[in-house]
Amino acid sequence: MTIPKSLVVAPAGLIVGIVLLSGCDVDLFGTDARPVVGGYKLLVWESGKYTLISDERNGCGVLNGTIERIAWSDSVILAEQTTCGGRNARSGWMVVDVKRHTIEGPIDPGTIPKRADVAGLKPISPAEAWQTLPGR
């Protein structure tokens, strides 16, 4: 008795596809990003690092770095980031104006309490922020 070729090839192809997809760093269901404000999202990597992204998912996010601490209001995001590197890259505190989609920084940390747009914000770890943000 011989087994029809189609009964062997189809399941084998399915198994190979599942194995290949499981090895990719791809979140097919979008559970690796949670909305912060103004179209910006906090993205968690498999390594446990976080970046701030907009619609596009480039490696180091819109701040070109990983998030160390973050706070936000309806109009701004304040984030301390460690740069991923690159030309003229600098780590530090960044301010994202979510209405104008502009990024300023790194800024002097001493100016944070004096700036009307970010004064009063209480930065927290990205892991803590992740827990407070709504899932998909």
Image (tube, rainbow, N blue to C red):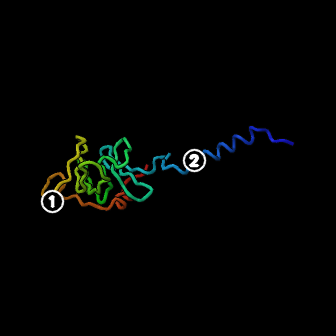
Sooner in the amino-acid sequence: mark 2 or mark 1: 2
At 32% from the left and 43% from the top, the residue drawn is 39
Residue in front for this viewpoint, 46 or 130: 46
Q: Is residue 8 left or right of residue 74?
A: right
Residue in front for this viewpoint, 113 or 6: 6
Element on which disc 2 rests: helix
Callout 2 environment at 10 Å: few (<14), some (14 to 19), or many (20+)? Answer: few
* Farthest residue, direction front: 87
Q: CA distance from mark 2 to mark 1?
A: 49 Å
Question: Badge 1 is on which residue?
Answer: 113
Question: Badge 2 is on which residue?
Answer: 20
At 45% from the left and 50% from the top, the residue drawn is 31
Query: Please, what is the three-letter code of the amino acid marked with disc 1?
Result: Pro
Q: Position of residue 8 (x, y in %)?
A: 74, 42
Q: Position of residue 68 (x, y in %)?
A: 30, 60
* Farthest residue, direction left: 114
Q: Is residue 13 left or right of residue 53?
A: right
Q: Position of residue 65 (x, y in %)?
A: 31, 53
**Quarter containing the N terminus:** top right
Q: Position of residue 93 (x, y in %)?
A: 22, 56
Query: Please, what is the three-letter code of the amino acid marked with disc 2?
Result: Leu
At 74% from the left and 37% from the top, the residue drawn is 6
Residue 33, numbered circle? none
Q: Is residue 55 left or right of residue 24?
A: left
Q: Is residue 17 left or right of residue 93?
A: right
